[in-house]
Amino acid sequence: MNDCLFCGIAAGDIPSTKVYEDETVLAFRDLNPQAPVHILVIPKTHITSVNALTEENAASATACLLAIPKIAAQEGFAAGGYRVVSNCGADAGQTVPHLHFHILAGKRLEDSMA
Ligand code: 5GP
Ligand code: ZN
């Protein structure tokens, strides 16, 4: 196993509260939620961030995006609305260098995104 935290979660070596899983994607609850619903959606294969996407690995990022409306329907927050965020690099405050999409929901989110 490499030393990537989210690769460890994807492999099941590090526990997480799973919300959704398919062949390519895992979604689990954020350990430090910033909204009533805070879910992380990751590709099971290691990609560092949006900035590392290529034609070759883009399918797993697309799979993450396609999982999001399924998760929204499953968890019941689609109607209320939600925010999807992917921090990319130091200035965005990315702390885990494995591509992930935050889903934030369950309240009226702040208007400011920056
Ligand atoms: P970033 O800051 O890289 O955009 O987001 C990383 C997210 O991962 C943070 O929201 C943080 O709370 C979450 N996180 C960090 N370590 C763990 C962990 O071990 N388990 C879970 N479920 N979330 C984690
Ligand atoms: Zn990784």
Image (cartoon, grey):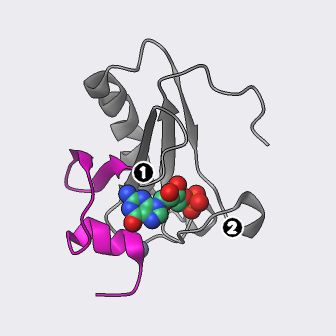
SS for callout 1: loop
Which residue is drawn at the image coordinates 74% and 37% (left, top)?
113
Q: Is residue 66 above or below residue 100?
A: above
Q: Is mark 1 within 8 Å of ligand 1?
A: yes
- Is residue 48 shown in magenta? no
Q: Is residue 62 above or below residue 50?
A: above
* Quadrant that contains the N terminus: bottom left
Which residue is drawn at the image coordinates 41% and 55% (left, top)?
31
Front of the two marks 1 and 2: 1
- Is residue 28 shown in magenta? yes
Q: Nearer the viewer, residue 18 or 41?
A: 18
The residue indicated by pointer 1 is: 30
Q: Which quadrant of the view contains residue 68? A: top left
Where is residue 101? Give x, y as percent: 50, 49
Q: Is residue 72 above or below residue 88?
A: above
Circle number at residue 83: none
Label 1 amino acid? Asp
The residue indicated by pointer 2 is: 89
Q: Quadrant of ligand 2?
A: bottom left
Q: Is residue 54 left or right of residue 68?
A: right
Residue 29 visible? The answer is yes
Label 2 amino acid? Gly
Where is residue 97? Give x, y as percent: 54, 72
